[in-house]
Image: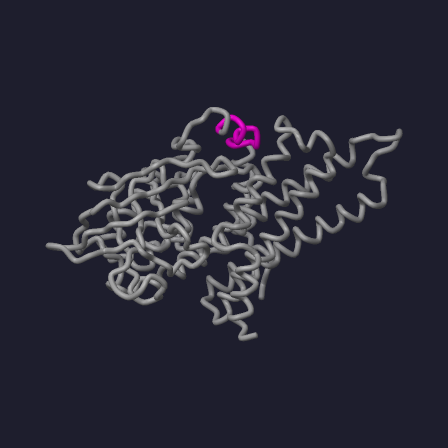
Amino acid sequence: MQLALTEDQSMLATTAAAFVADKSPLSRARTLRDGGDPLGYSKPLWKEMAALGWTGIPFSEKDGGAGLGLAEAVLVTEALGRALAPEPFVPAVMLAGQALAIAGADAQRAARLGPLIAGDEVLAMAFQEPGGRYDVHRVETAAAPSAGGFRVRGTKVQVMAGHGADAFVVTARTSGGAADRDGITLLLVPARASGVRVVPQRRLDSRNAAFVRLEDVEVPRSAVLGPVGGGADALDEAIDRATVALCGEMLGAMAEAFDRTLAYLKERVQFDVLIGTFQALKHRAARMFVEVELARSAVAAAARAVDARRDDRRALVSNAKARCSDAYVHVANEAIQMHGGIGMTDEHDIGFFIKHARVAATTFGDAAFHRDRFAKACRF
């Protein structure tokens, strides 16, 4: 598999890195957190990202996108990860947007993907439920037939970018038991629909999330994405794509944490010598470097496998997520340790990475979950 970047991909990566460094330095994460804004990101900056074409990367030209793939999308999420930029690229574009692109009819895509790609609207995916853990097919939210459509009742948790979203892609059960894969239906529900209650949350890394309560929400038949009761395939594919995009963000963040730690080792003096000359710290830094580079290869392999629709793509997605979850937590922990006492203080920016690492490592399934999924995919 070709892992080297093409000329166009290299240009995209360079442009994305320069834009994020200029518009969203890491200090911005502190400003947004301390400001207490429940939205947690900048709509004008989101619009600028759209103007650069980022929000259209994974969508077809027919839908107004760039017709590119995950191999390009992860270059953007890696740049965003380096600055811990909180704009909702993964939840809006790579999760909810992809579910709509996969399962939506022409009219549904035209109505919602255009504004998303233009940066005028944000979509969110409401698929997790209390007690569901990582089982995305455990759906108790019920969609009962009603005059002209469905009446939806249920509660969704940890809806990323849910506060301020313009519409939700909701998983609801139209048949079967609570844990059945069959019987799941995807519904496009406007955030302002009667009966939709959005309760803002803030995750450990200060990112925007929400509880979404659906209290007898009436949706028309035209709100159904794909076949009634047959939404699991689109759900699984969208989550896999979002997982790889998140891995790109984790890769960028762990690479930045490593670079900052390496710079500190080269400037901190103890006992009249640079601590970077201590052999024990050299070994630990070397392991951090290896972990970052292994993660980089795993993410690239997963992105290209999904783009090519290879038979082993699910295994490679899980390989990337397990690798990134373990590596990012390790690198963030080591970064704190090697910064010593200042690393434990809120005043130092290195602490933002360990919080983001804890959240990202468990999003879409932790390392243990994905090692198990990898083994099953490989028929171990």
Inspect the magenta stretch and tell me whether residue 24 lies in it. yes
Residue 358 pos. (x, y %): 56, 45
Residue drawn at (30%, 59%), measured in percent from left and top? 103
Question: In this rendering, does residue 12 appear at all?
Answer: no
Magenta: main secondary structure equals helix
Q: Nearer the viewer, residue 148 or 299?
A: 148
Q: Is residue 157 left or right of residue 112?
A: right
Question: In this rendering, does residue 239 appear at all?
Answer: yes
Image quadrant where one finds the C terminus: bottom right
Inspect the magenta stretch and tell me whether residue 320 lies in it. no
Report how many numbered discs are placed on residues in the image: 0
Residue drawn at (19%, 57%), measured in percent from left and top? 144
Residue 169 pos. (x, y %): 31, 50
Figure check: 42 above or below 111 = above
Q: Which stretch appears magenta? A: 23-32
Q: Nearer the viewer, residue 275 or 333?
A: 333
Q: Residue furthest bottom?
A: 379
Q: Quadrant of residue 83?
A: top right
Q: Nearer the viewer, residue 17 or 380?
A: 380
Q: Is residue 108 left or right of residue 267?
A: left
Q: Nearer the viewer, residue 50 or 278?
A: 278
